[in-house]
Amino acid sequence: MQTRPVTPDDLAQSVIAVPPMARDENLVFHPAENEKIIRHIEAGGTSTLLYGGNANFYHIALSEYESILGQLAELAGPETLVIPSVGPAYGMMMDQAAIVKETDYPTVMVLPQQGLTTSEGVVTGLRKFAEKVGKPIVLYIKYGDFITVEGARQLVEDGIISWIKYAIVQEDPAADPYLADLVEQVDPRLIVSGIGEQPVVEHLNDFGVNGFTAGCVCIRPDLSEELREAVQSKDLIRAREIQKIFRPLEDLRNGINPVRVLHEAVRLAGIADTGPALPLLSGISEEEEKRVEEAAEALLAT
């Protein structure tokens, strides 16, 4: 596992895969199946793994947290950057800080808490967490009321932000006043598009952010990396063509549930047995499974 500090070049040189986490029938972390997912992603040229929402770190038990972090570090290749998550509750992240501090992970992402938060409170909480963990952190902006642009800027100026995952969904990704303000107040090289392959052209080309995270990269990492390279080289015609290939599975993720669909898609594509969903989530219906299987197999075979 790569342990040096994360740089803007790291963010630009690889798609940031956000994989699901495989568990056995008893909901225990499954090393062999998780290794299959990691090897598949690495084989496609992707060298950054972010374990967050798709891995359901929202509901991970504190009792298993240290063990899972240790196993992920061992499973990843020597040049693969792995980033775990903490939170989303303040008490949980502060307990997790003591564990992360003793690892070689160069950074950690704080999951966004929806509700019972204020921007001022989030800024204070993340400062306290960063102080305790002793590492720069990843700020995940998923909800417009989670943190203001000014709050994000303050944290960057504090020197505690490794990078920002921006994932507020807009009907038109080219019309995004929050992101427009964010790239004015924060170095765009520290900002990554966090909504998969579909808004990449607008986010990277129009707003100038520095890379993107994706779930469907776990199915076709080589194609997702080609999309990244096409946008960075301004070959937007090819980029749009690749986006169309990802769209059927992405549409199912948006229409059903992004986390639940990706969890099953990795299994249905034959990449790894991801096992049952960790509560408080559940699987998908038989009818949904058929559609997801068709889309995942088509994406894998294209």
Image (cartoon, rainbow, N blue to C red):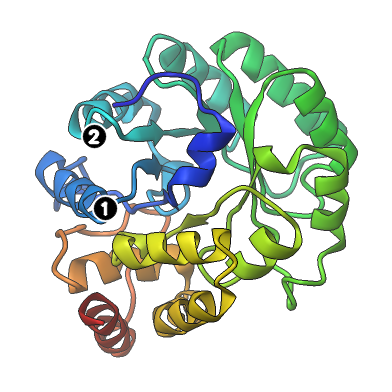
User: Relative to residue 122, is residue 184 drawn left or right?
Assistant: right
Quickly name the residue at label 2.
Answer: 76
Q: Secondary structure at mark 1?
A: helix
Quarter of the image for the N terminus: give it.
top left
Identify the residue shown where x is 84% and y is 56%. Answer: 180
Q: Residues within 10 Å of mark 1 (few under 14, many from 20)?
A: many
- Tell whether 196 sits left or right of 126: left
- Nearer to me, 217 or 205: 205
Q: Nearer the viewer, residue 67 or 103?
A: 103
x then y, percent, for residue 232: 56, 58
> Total number of numbered labels?
2
What residue is shown with label 1? 41
Who's the residue at 82% across and 71% down the image?
175
Q: CA gap, disc 1 to disc 2?
A: 10 Å
Q: Position of residue 125 (x, y in %)?
A: 72, 24
Circle number at residue 203: none
As displayed, is residue 291 above or below residue 106? below
Q: Residue at x 58, y 35 (%)?
A: 8
Residue 262: x, y in percent?
36, 66
SS for dot 2 = loop
Residue type at mark 2 is Ala
- Within 10 Å of disc 2 (Cα), the crowding (few <14, some 14-19, many 20+) is many
- Residue 282 showing in the rendered view: no
Q: Give the answer, above or below, for where 104 lies relative to 80.
A: above
Pointers 1 and 2 in contact (C-beta within 8 Å)? no
- Residue found farthest to the left: 32
Task: Decide which of 179, 235 is in the foreground and name it.
Answer: 235
Q: Is residue 123 left or right of residue 163?
A: right
Amino acid type of the residue tagged 1 in the rendering? Ile
- Disc with the residue nearer the chain's start (1 vs 2): 1
Q: Residue at x 26, y 23 (%)?
A: 70
